[in-house]
Image (cartoon, helix red, strand yellow):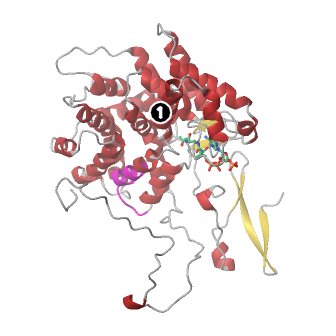
Amino acid sequence: MGDTAKLILQDQEYELHVRVGTEGNRVIDISKLYAMTGHITLDDGFANTGGATSAITYIDGEQGILRYRGYRIEELAERCDFLEVAFLLIYGELPTAEQLEEFRQGIRRRTLLHEGMKDIFRGFPPDAHPMAILSSVVNALSIYCKDSLDPLDENQRQLAMYRLLAKMPTIAAFGYKQSVGQAFMYPQNHLDYCQNFLYMMFALPSERYHINPEHVEALNLLLILHADHGQNCSTSTVRMVGSSNVNLFSAVAAGINALWGQLHGGANEACINMLEQIVAEGGNIGKFIDRAKDPNDPFRLMGFGHRIYKNYDPRAKIIKAMADRLLSKQAATNPLFQVAQELEEVALKDPYFVDRKLYPNVDFYSGIIYRALGIPKNMFTVLFALGRLPGWIAHWREMHMSSSKRIHRPRQLYIGYPERPYVPIVKRSTEPPKEVSIQRPPQGVFPGGEFEL
Ligand code: ACO
């Protein structure tokens, strides 16, 4: 086992450095490959590409292991509160009592939004998706927080991190309140992070609001379990966008958009939709399993499968146990939980899923808990974003503090036309290009007449 890899290209031999991670995983460093050989590597979807060196989160997908800064997720989920884990992810160590208090204070005193921002919410139509609202308003923080935009200044970085951790729950809850036509509930800074979020979501100016401690516990757990997961789609987006030295708010707004997609954080909403559909259609699990296996059907079992985990996602195990605890207190059986468990049981015995090592992921049971907390479906991914925020911040900070930081700029294998002469418009082919379909909008769709609003 040497620490170089040999590559033979057109009869010429090159040596590539092999780097070894702290857990023994070995990577071939190709950063000098182009300079050495004139070749780049190609890896669609980055399935086999390390985009960063990172000391934040360790995942062993084969064994189903997840650790934040060396600590097992099971232990952190049992013993910590969310801000403690946020501190750990961002700064690398569990905080002392004093450090934690300072961290909490730094966040607690910044939960309010500029009053002008309320008009931004008011401008959105009531059916706007809360993820679109979240990313828009988080981006708008870069308009209101101008003294914390420089990612190269540690003081401004620190201020931006506090502000975002403090204001994102307020933005998320205001977005929800706007969508249901209720008054914005201002943050109550004597409450802790999770209590405050539940208060802003569910309290009404006209009623006393009792914060259910079991709901606080469940929310705390879910936020911790979502807090980081290595170079996933949204985190690598935050790194990619942040690498241009844009401010934290804009980089995280981009990450929120990446998270929204159904193949990533949007799977929790899609998963509940799927479970509801199964229940509505009389619980015919077999039909959905068959559809998921059919190569001609784009349907996939939502909340199943993972690029990295080829074993049970450790987060799904913890979430399932929490769902069990929370729902056991309800008088009636929860049909969605029941169907989910049956679906899991059938899938885990089916050779299609076994052969492909497809197991429940973090999104499979999380929606069932959100539902039990009264969180509406279209807010599920927003909750995921609140949980993932410390991870995004930690990666953004780690990138900016790295001496090897460069703008992210992947290359490509060009497969288009070679150079060809310009064709004047009268001589162009009347055949429509294969890849272009220009469709006229149906008549009369624009309420304003000829013009779209
Ligand atoms: N249902 C049915 N088949 C599946 C599923 C699924 N959920 N997931 C993967 N497969 C199949 C694929 O069809 C493919 O089969 P094939 O080899 O016969 O072509 C094989 O398993 C490998 O799948 P890929 O799409 O190549 O795996 P990839 O790593 O690219 O995708 C992903 C991972 C996107 C998570 C995928 O498993 C999926 O779409 N799952 C459902 C959506 C979901 O739950 N997303 C949340 C992920 S966790 C998170 O982001 C927080």
Q: Position of residue 272 (x, y in %)?
A: 48, 31
The answer, for residue 360, to whether it is visible in the render is no
Which quadrant holds the N terminus? Answer: bottom right
The answer to whether 93 appears left or right of 123 in the picture is right
- Decide: is 313 above or below 439: above
For image coordinates 64% across by 45% down, the residue present is 308
Please state the horizontal and vertical placement of residue 311, each as a whole percent of the image. Answer: 70, 36
> Is residue 161 placed above or below 184 in the rendered structure?
below
Q: Which residue is mark 1?
A: 273
199 vs 133: above or below: above
Crowding around mark 1 (Cα neighbors within 10 Å: few <14, some 14 to 19, many 20+) is some
Q: Position of residue 130 (x, y in %)?
A: 33, 40
Question: What range of the chain is rendered magenta?
Answer: 244-255
Residue at x 41%, y 31% (from the top left corner) = 100
User: As drawn, which residue projects farthest toward the right?
Assistant: 1
- Between residues 23 and 308, which one lies in front from this camera angle? 308
